Image (cartoon, rainbow, N blue to C red):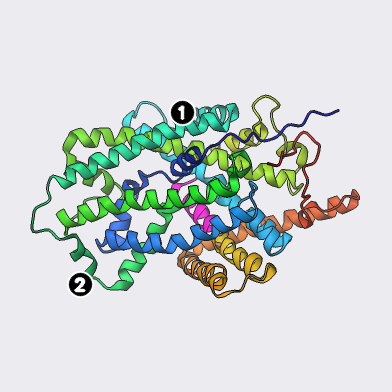
Amino acid sequence: MTNEVSLRKSLSLYQVVYMGLAWMTPMIYFSIYGIAYENAHGMLAQAYLLAFIAIFFTAYSYGVMSKTFPTSGSAYTYTQKSIHPYLGFLVGWALLLDYFFSPIIACLTFGIYLHAQFPSIPAYVWIIGLNIVLGAVNMIGIKFSANISKLFVWIQILFIAVFCFFLARNLTGDVHPMGLFIQNDVPFSAILAGASMICFSFLGFDTVTTMSEETVNAKKTIPRAIMIIIVTASILYLVPSVLTQLIYPHLTLVNVDSAGFEIVKLVGGAALSSVFITVLILAIFTQGLSSVTSVSRLLYVMGRDSILPKRVFAFLHPKFNTPVINIAIVSCVSLLALAISLDSAVKFVNFGALTAFFFVNISVIAQKYIKEKQRSVKHTFLYLALPLAGAGFIGYLLSLLDLDALWMGGVWLIIGIMYHLIWKKVSSGAGTVLAPMSIPHKPMRTSGSIKQG
């Protein structure tokens, strides 16, 4: 009799929230401050508010689908079961770009910042070192990762709170916050352009859906976690934006790339700016930790469905109950940080994330409105109007990606199509049933099966 090894249900609501916030990285507010400020023509508060409204629709759709299919495949599973298995494969393949290149970005920025602080130590030393640590921590178990994420997320939140405290000290009685939202000197199109870029600050809330099979009462917990993450991030972004805009309505930035450091130094002086670098490095570490967790789980589900070689990608360590081979593979791929540029990595992430977001919105319509025929007035609003609004905005954001991002994403999809054709031919030749066309509803009694409930 073969002992069943499965992902262990151990994550609570707030552990899932911390993992999602760790991936999102609240400190990204400062990392993209200069670019966001320029794109929004200084109207950061308005741009962040619009971005929150836009992302809310997609977050809602993820919540609906995570209740319907509480498994760890995220957009891949939702599209596969709601629309079509082959389209699900393509969405999962595109999503791999987002998940694979997120730890690469973490390693790359980690090496850049620490090399800047310690020039005598080459960046590749920090990149390789971070890869080893992220892999080891993830192999030990997701609960251990969640506890580390909790600590570092709170450090980031505390820093942003201190930053806001320094800002609030400079407020005067004649300042009226509501005045920010009735200004007419900046065209709405400019604010919308800023919001479209700022939306990328919210990327990461979706990764918690890859942890469904390791979450207690996932049908209830995951949707709640998604909304808590989105609302928390919005507060962390919007409050400092409002305060900064009130106190410094006309900023002149010396360097757009380091504008976050500039504003911290302007507000809190040398003391706060020295702490800023330390907290930013911790934030990058937690983002990398959560990224490795997410991509290793997506690979696990695709392996379990035999889209990827099952013996490799669906393997779980008998003691730690973690996909250790997947984690090792992700760590090896993350070494691309030694050769790839940050700009290219970000383009891959944007294409993969937005593609997944678009089809999750469409999946709600396909599953709830069309398949389940929930078409009352209330359900029409919930399962047609809201996801259509989300799909429309995400489609607009996809259209804003530059040609390089679309070209690289297109090439990646072509590679996926070729892989699927080869896999299909090999599988047919071996006389096997093509797993992507139907996922078993009951757990298979193998070393990679999943306990339900």
Q: Nearer the viewer, residue 177 or 409?
A: 177
Left or right: where 98 falls relative to 303:
left
Name the residue located 40 percent from the left edge and 31 percent from the top edge. Answer: 151
The residue most toward the top is 319
The label on residue 116 is none
Residue shown at 18% from the left, 65% from the top = 179
- Classify mark 2: helix, strand or loop: loop
**Which image quadrant for residue 7?**
top right
Amino acid found under the numbered disc labelled 2: Asp
Q: Quadrant of residue 56?
A: bottom left
| Above or below 170: residue 397 | below
Residue at disc 1, secondary structure: helix
1 and 2 marks in contact (CB < 8 Å): no
Q: Which quadrant, please, contains the N terminus?
A: top right
Left or right of residue 318: residue 125 = left
User: What is the magenta range?
Assistant: 340-354
